[in-house]
Image (cartoon, helix red, strand yellow):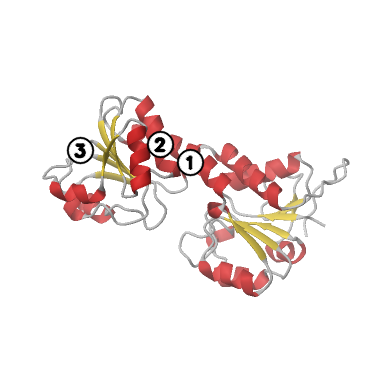
Amino acid sequence: MCQFFIFGSDPRQLYLAEILAEKRLPFASSYETNPRWTYLSFEKAMETCPVILAPLPFTRNQKTIFKTPGDGLSILDFCSMLRPGQTLFGGSLPPVVTSFCRENQITFFDYMELEEVCIENAVATAEGAVCEAIRISPGTLQGSAGLLAGYGRCGRVLARKLKALDMKLTVMEKNPEKLALAKADGFSVIRPEALDALSSLHWQYLFNTVPAPLFGKEQLSRMPKSVTILDIASAPGGVDFDFCRSTGRCALLCPGLPGRFAPKAAAQVLADAVFRRVPISPSPKETTSAQTI
């Protein structure tokens, strides 16, 4: 019997499957990308595999599972396939799933609530944000004035990387401890309410890590039209993208940066988190050919 069932076509899932294969762990996949992997139909795998490795994010529209065949499997249909005693891993699990699991004796782990995953993902997210800023901006980061909203795990890593590129960075943070930490790290700091007192927001780059509506029409209209905006916060983000589009401001929402820029490293982070929480049962050294059920 396969111990793990992995599905979703996000690159992280494919690398995660390779990690399982390298460790000779018995797993099934819902895609036939490698002839040496065991392929099971979705229904059969959900019925027989005790550990379910769902994608990150679990869903993008709160209705269907992200990156399942045809993106057509509804969350409710997925829940109906879960069985008591199974263990579910996934990223940003919606409340309907976690509630179902609690009510039906299903163990679950949300990757985005595991501290070690969030810390290690912050590095890949920050590097991806820098890459995107370089890609979409006509200028250089060096010597430019930038505003970074939020000094949490991801914000602090991103701030260090931007500082290493000689950006003149200001950190905006409402938490007094984090604000003091940013100041101690050598950054200019500002509180969110201080934006209202500024007639002009002169920054050439805006990086937002706060999942709250901080930058609406009033704030954005005081920024130069040449500003480059990257929102790397989880939904709902913090930038009014409709206003940016209507006024020609360059703004980019950046979900899933680890999966896009560092999928192999991100997959290893997920694998390590799974192995810490699930007893693993390696397959015999003799490998068998893949089968389709």
What secondary structure is marked by label 2?
A: helix
Q: Residue 133: x, y in percent?
A: 34, 35
Give yes or no for contact between labels 3 and 2 (Cβ–Cβ under 8 Å).
no
Q: Residue at x 61, y 46 (%)?
A: 270
In the visual, does 291 lie left or right of 43?
Answer: right
Give the mark nearest the N terminus, 2 or 1.
1
User: Considering only vertical position in the picture, is 105 above or below 219?
Assistant: below
Mark number displayed over residue 122: 1
The residues bearing labels 2 and 1 have C-alpha atoms spaced at a distance of 8 Å
The residues bearing labels 3 and 1 have C-alpha atoms spaced at a distance of 27 Å
> Tag 1: Cα neighbours inside 10 Å, few (<14), some, or many (≥20)?
many
Q: Residue 220: x, y in percent?
A: 20, 49
Give the mark nearest the N terminus, 3 or 1.
1
Give yes or no for contact between labels 2 and 1 (Cβ–Cβ under 8 Å).
yes
Q: Which residue is mark 3?
A: 226
In the visual, does 272 lie left or right of 260?
Answer: right
Q: Residue at x 29, y 27 (%)?
A: 140
Instruction: Between label 3 and label 1, give the one nearer the viewer.
Output: 1
Q: Which residue is mark 2?
A: 158
Looking at numbered disc 3 in the image, what kind of residue is underneath it? Answer: Ser
Q: Residue 1: x, y in percent?
A: 82, 57
> Tag 3: Cα neighbours inside 10 Å, few (<14), some, or many (≥20)?
some
